[in-house]
Amino acid sequence: NAGVTQTPKFRILKIGQSMTLQCTQDMNHNYMYWYRQDPGMGLKLIYYSVGAGITDKGEVPNGYNVSRSTTEDFPLRLELAAPSQTSVYFCASTDRGGVIQPQHFGDGTRLSIL
Amino acid sequence: GENVEQHPSTLSVQEGDSAVIKCTYSDSASNYFPWYKQELGKRPQLIIDIRSNVGEKKDQRIAVTLNKTAKHFSLHITETQPEDSAVYFCAASRSGNAGNMLTFGGGTRLMVKP
């Protein structure tokens, strides 16, 4: 049971390039999330998904896109990378239930845009 | 939406002393309050959580208290050790919000001096 797996761990992009951050979980969780964490700051929600085929915007969605074709995978796409998107990106998941369950985080992707 | 404020932003204590971190929230319907510990370069890890039907919860040297009337909750760490040094985040959520989204505080950097 690997939990939440993110790839790559590190990446350097040039301004205007695009890339996809991968996230997969093996816990059969319905809910998945993407956060960004700027240096010395808290986590801000970019997008979330409550199940396959269903996604919605969080607090800071501009410049990002997501898809959820399977329960396991929740990739985050940056189309035109900008320096303001330099950050650490965390994917998380949790189970759906009558009672809120804790979110489980991946190890993060450290992204620098130069 | 929910707003979570966390204080202090930095906290330095002597090994063996206690540390207290406080958070306030704005949405009176919030009913789930987790605390995460994040070591440098690592993922946030859940250390304790509390639900609104209890006022206090303990786990060895860690305790969390909740005051629903005042809309604040606190993390208490007793007999601090150098390995407690990390950034701590509080968060809040409520049942029924789509995707059980968490709103995070800004974090507290705890330094335990040997």
Image (cartoon, rainbow, N blue to C red):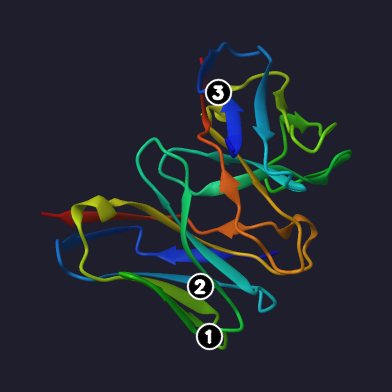
Mark 1–mark 3 distance (CA, rounded to whole Å): 40 Å
| Callouts 2 and 3 on one subunit | no
Residue A51 picture location, percent across and down: 83, 45
**How far is the residue under mark 2 from the one under mark 3?**
32 Å
Whether residue A71 appears in this view of the structure is yes
Q: Are marks 1 and 3 in contact (CB under 8 Å)?
A: no
Identify the residue position indicated by label 2 in the image.
B24
Residue at the spot 47% in from the left edge and 50% down from the top edge: B45
Q: Residue at x 61, y 22 (%)?
A: A82
Residue A34 on image: x %, y % = 65, 40
Vertical position of residue B78 compared to residue B84: above or below: below
Q: Name which residue type carries label 1.
A: Ala
Does B58 sit above or below residue A62?
Answer: below
Q: Amino acid at mark 3?
A: Pro
Quadrant position of residue B76: bottom left
The crowding category of the residue bearing disc 3, from other C-alpha atoms within 10 Å (few below 14, some 14 to 19, many at least 20), is: some
Q: CA distance from mark 2 to mark 1?
A: 8 Å
- The mark found on residue B70 in the picture is 1
Horizontal placement of A74 versus B19: left or right?
A: right
**x and y, in percent, of residue B29 in the image:** 70, 77
Q: Which residue is mark 3?
A: A83
Bin the neighbour count of mark 2 within 10 Å (Cα to Cα): few under 14, some 14-19, many 20 and up: many
Tell me the chain of label 1: B
Indicate the secondary structure of the residue bearing disc 2: strand
Up the image or down, A113 lies above or below B90; here it is: above
Residue found at the very far front of the displayed protein: A1
> First in sequence: mark 2 or mark 1?
2
